[in-house]
Structures are given as C-alpha cells and as structure tokens.
Image (cartoon, helix red, strand yellow):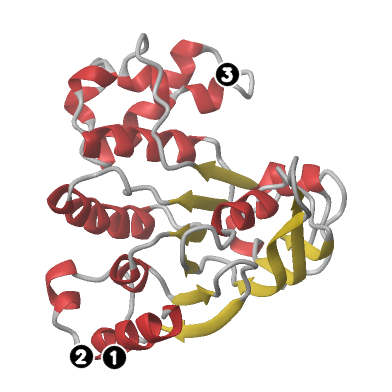
C-alpha cells in the first residue's frame, strides 16, 4: 500500500491499491430493527490486481463496491484507496460500472462512451475523438454511430466498459457486468474482458455470482459469507493473466479452486 498521497495530487494506476479493514455497514428499515449488510470485513487489492468477490445474494457485494467508490461511508472500520480514506478522494480514484449498461437511447455508441469525458468538461466532439481509438481496440469500430437499440447485449456492455475506462480512474469497480447476458454471450464477454484488462491495466474489483467467471478473470477471489457479509475464504489463482477461456475450463487447478469456493459458499 502506498503512503498517504498529498492532497490534490492525481492518483495513478501504478500506485493505487484498495484496503478495507474491519468494515461494517448497517441499514435502518422502516419497520423492524437495523440490518447489517457488512460486518468485520477485511479486503486488500494490490495496485494493478484483479480481485473477484463472490457471495450469496444479499450479502453486501454491491454495498462493498459503493463503499470503495466513496458513494457510502462505513459505519465502522476504514476504506482506503490509493492511500486516501476520504469519500471525495475515493470517488476521484474509482469508476463504477453497474449491472445495467445505462446507455442513453437517443445517443449513438460513441456519444454514450464520451459521456464520461463530457462530465469532466470535455466538449462532445473532442470526447468522441478520444473514444474512437478505444472503439477500434475493443472491436467496436464499425458501431460508433449505432444507437443502443441496434446493438447486441454484448456490444452494449463493451460500450459501457469503454465509457468506464474513459473516466480515467485507476480503480475499476465492476458490479455483475455480464449478469444480463445469455450464457454464450457471457462466455465471449469474459474472454473479451480478460483481453481488455491486459490492454488497459487497472486495479479492479469484480463482483459476480459466477465462481468460474471470478476465477477466470481474477488474480485472487474473496468469498463472502451470507449477510452480514465478511470474507470467509481467500483463493489465489496461480495462473498468469490474460487466460484462455477454453483452456481454463479444463484446468485442474481452477477446478480445485472452484470446488473450494463452492464449498465456502454452501
């Protein structure tokens, strides 16, 4: 973990790790007592590392991402990104990609991706020019002027991912990015994301219900308990990234890790 960065100094991908220590987050219901989403959670993500987070529904996985992103504050414990614990500092370092692509139907693909830059004050034409090279790199070159309704689910997720990258943040928080896709498209997008992260390295926290997806894409996998969520198992994936999806399916090491993850989940 790097030392505390001076206020106002930009964070780079090379020195931006994530650390959560004894984090708790509680919610109050209109009826009944408080609900503990997370309790006593410890998690570290090294700079440039991809960490997958799996767990049962309702165990606080999305809450975890929002805490890292500075959209929520912990009730207990600390959340540090790039040596900084302030919510504004965490927001400045993180880009969150939610489950839904949230593309604007009246904008074409380049216009949707460029929104990340326009939010920072970049003009729309300049934003499109800066988005275009990523479209070419990630197989979207022919679809820059297509509206979202004309794109497949996988293409829409690619556009959403490019938009997330264009935000220029060193930490990417991916919340079930392929949950809405069919099985074949999801497999294709897993390989695409593995290659994309190799081309554009970032510090990544990937939340997913799919154990195989987490093992294929991640350097390490953290398994959360049922609510309140805490890390009950940590699995190191001893294979270099990016990996080949077909080879990974039959790899004996990944098969053993999958069995351990499923045992921890049940």
Please tell me which residue lies in front, 99 or 14: 99
Quadrant of the image for the C terminus?
bottom left
Q: How many marks?
A: 3
Please tell me which residue lies in front, 180 or 140: 180
Horizontally, residue 9 falls left or right of residue 218, namely right
Q: Earlier in the sequence, mark 1 or mark 3?
A: 3
- Can I make out residue 237 in this image? no
Q: Position of residue 49 (x, y in %)?
A: 50, 69
- What's the mark number on residue 122? 3
Mark 2 = which residue? 252
In the rendered structure, are the residues bearing label 1 and label 2 in contact, judged by CB atoms less than 8 Å apart?
yes
Q: Residue at coordinates 23% horizontally, 39% vertically from top-left? A: 154
Which residue is farthest right?
Answer: 7
Q: Which of labels 2 and 3 is toward the front?
A: 2
Q: Position of residue 148 (x, y in %)?
A: 28, 20
Q: Which of labels 1 and 3 is toward the front?
A: 1
Mark 1 = which residue? 256
Horizontally, residue 110 falls left or right of residue 204, namely left
Disc 1, SS: helix
Q: Position of residue 1 (x, y in %)?
A: 71, 73
* Residue 49, above or below 185: below
Q: Residue at coordinates 24% horizontally, 51% vertically from top-left? A: 189
Q: Residues within 10 Å of mark 3 (few under 14, many from 20)?
A: some
* Residue 32, above or below 237: above
Q: Residues within 10 Å of mark 1 (few under 14, many from 20)?
A: few
């Amino acid at each position: 973990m790097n030392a505390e960065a001076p206020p106002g100094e930009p964070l780079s991908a090379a020195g931006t790790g994530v650390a959560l220590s004894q984090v708790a987050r509680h919610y109050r219901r209109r009826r009944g007592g408080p609900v503990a989403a997370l309790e006593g959670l410890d998690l570290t993500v090294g700079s440039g590392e991809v960490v997958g987070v799996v767990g049962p529904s309702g165990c606080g996985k999305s809450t975890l991402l929002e805490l890292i992103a500075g959209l929520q504050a912990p009730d207990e414990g600390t959340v540090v990104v790039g040596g900084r614990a302030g919510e504004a500092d965490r927001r400045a370092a993180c880009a969150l990609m939610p489950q839904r692509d949230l593309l604007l139907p009246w904008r074409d693909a380049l216009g949707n991706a460029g929104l990340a830059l326009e939010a920072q004050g970049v003009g729309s034409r300049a934003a499109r020019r800066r988005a275009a090279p990523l479209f070419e790199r990630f197989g979207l070159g022919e679809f820059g002027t297509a509206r979202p309704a004309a794109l497949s689910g996988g293409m829409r997720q690619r556009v959403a991912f490019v938009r997330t990258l264009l935000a220029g943040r060193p930490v990417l928080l991916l919340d079930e990015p392929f949950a809405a896709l069919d099985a074949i498209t999801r497999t294709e997008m897993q390989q695409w994301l593995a290659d994309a992260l190799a081309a554009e390295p970032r510090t990544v926290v990937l939340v997913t219900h799919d154990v195989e997806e987490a093992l294929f894409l991640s350097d390490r996998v953290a398994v959360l308990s049922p609510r309140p969520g805490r890390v009950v198992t940590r699995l190191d994936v001893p294979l270099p990234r990016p990996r080949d999806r077909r080879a990974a399916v039959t790899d004996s090491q990944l098969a053993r890790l999958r069995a351990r993850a499923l045992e921890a989940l049940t």
